[in-house]
Amino acid sequence: MRKTLRWVLSLVVLIGTAGAAGATTTGAATAAEPATAAETATAAETATAAETATKDIKDRLLAVPGMSLIEEKPYPGYRFFVLNYTQPVDHRHPSKGTFKQRLTVLHKDTSRPTVYYTSGYSVSTNPSRREPTQIVDGNQISMEYRFFTPSRPEPADWTKLDIWQAATDQHRIYQALKPIYGKKWLATGISKGGMTATYYERFYPRDMAGIVSYVAPNDVVDKEDSAYDEFLAGVGTKECRDRIQAVQREALVRREPLSAKLAAYAGAEGYTFKTVGTLDKAFEAVVMDLVWGFWQYQPAATACGKIPDAATMTDQALFDYVDSVGGWSSYSDQGLTPYTPYYYQAGTELGAPTIEQPWLGDLSRYGYQPPRNFVPREIPMKFKPNAMRDVDRWVRHNAHRMMYVYGEYDPYGAEKFRPARGAKHDSYVFTAPGANHGATVSQLVADQKAKATERIQTWAGVPSDSGKPLAAYDKKLDRRDVRKEQTLRP
């Protein structure tokens, strides 16, 4: 483009100079030769490119084949679009049907870098900005993961829900929007979204200029989960661990009165338990998650002191506390349905933690239940053990410009990704002290925060030595409540 513009400008200058000379020098001027076909075509392409660049961004987005508008929502300083993009159900056989995949565009300026975000679940249809987007002051493309409603083929062929198909969804959207957003792109995600960004890089390593993955577990061998047990045995203080374990144990001791309360609650709210099988299985699944969920989501610095004394609690107080940490509706059919694609993937490729919890003794009837229990039986599942081993091996040996951020108190950080290290690979693993499943770059210690910020900006092509985000904090765009977002269960 720059060479073409320089050629056009040079031609204009040359013609202008020749005209001026002809006006002052008798007989010196000669007629200009006709432009060649190639020169005419080049000039036309330049004019077309200039015309395209001046089109409204909505028109440019909707000119992408397969793209359609759901709605545009105003936000100061941005344009925000909710869109559908037509994708093949099976990228290996594109002729065998399509579905509409939802995405959003938080548009700032095509001259800025772009952050490509996915939660690994549904997409929010309200304007929001992920931390890397604030750090680079860029645009943000957010993609809904395939098979999360409404981005689900009908009828749903669940064998087409795997990490390669999803990565190829991302790749096609990138290819469709790269001509519009031509500056560098970074992929990011939180929890399952951080895993998704990793898998995308594994299958399409030439698309992104860098990866920023938050709190992404790396369950390489699904049957080997001792790292999680070791983590839970040492996280926080012994007093805090003892207090939350006592609450969990007390809930199982009082199974009968608390189950009666759950039955009444479910009846009032219309909750059913067909998928998991029985109310008792749902009851125990919630209680078994209590310790994990406490460390995953609660702010340990303040939450430990608020754990009630299990022995003196009334049944209602105990029921309410378990609900505040784990949510009694989690394993109802209504609570499971939005997460069916996650549990399917956990039981076919991703793996899921199984923890021992020896402090419960023989109070558990079912043990830590597997993902198969949380997916309707009419959906067949078969685990593929090589999927995560392949990704782990690739990250260890081939990672380039990949950053992982974990929280000190987050159980999912017990099995981390370990990218190839060294200047050649330019990859990093950081752990935010005192942070949980909501860990961010902003929570890192000062020198690591500055380093991470500098690398993200450099990867995005907007280097800065300030060590700070390039965009000011926006309390609406940047506010995040990890408990209200779809993240890895529990």
Image (cartoon, helix red, strand yellow):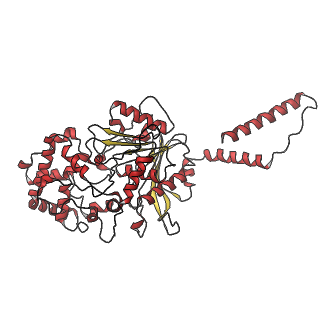
- Residue positioned most to the bottom: 378
Q: Position of residue 379 (x, y in %)?
A: 34, 69
Tell me the quadrant of the picture where the C terminus can be found.
bottom left
- Residue positioned most to the right: 27
151 over 47 or under it: above or below: below
Depth order, front residue of 410/470: 410
Give the side of residue 302 with respect to residue 52, left or right.
left
Q: Position of residue 481 (x, y in %)?
A: 31, 45
Depth order, front residue of 87/269: 87
Q: Residue at x 56, y 58 (%)?
A: 65
Depth order, front residue of 313/270: 313
Quarter-wise, where is residue 426 in the image?
A: top left
Give the side of residue 361 with respect to residue 408, left or right.
left
- Residue positioned most to the left: 312
Residue 344 shows in the view: yes
Q: Residue at x 80, y 47 (%)?
A: 36
Q: Residue at x 90, y 28 (%)?
A: 25
Marker count (numbered): 0
Give the side of residue 402 with respect to residue 357, left or right.
right
91 over 356 or under it: above or below: below
Q: Position of residue 6 (x, y in %)?
A: 71, 37
Residue 121 shows in the view: no
Tell me the quadrant of the picture where the N terminus can be found.
top right
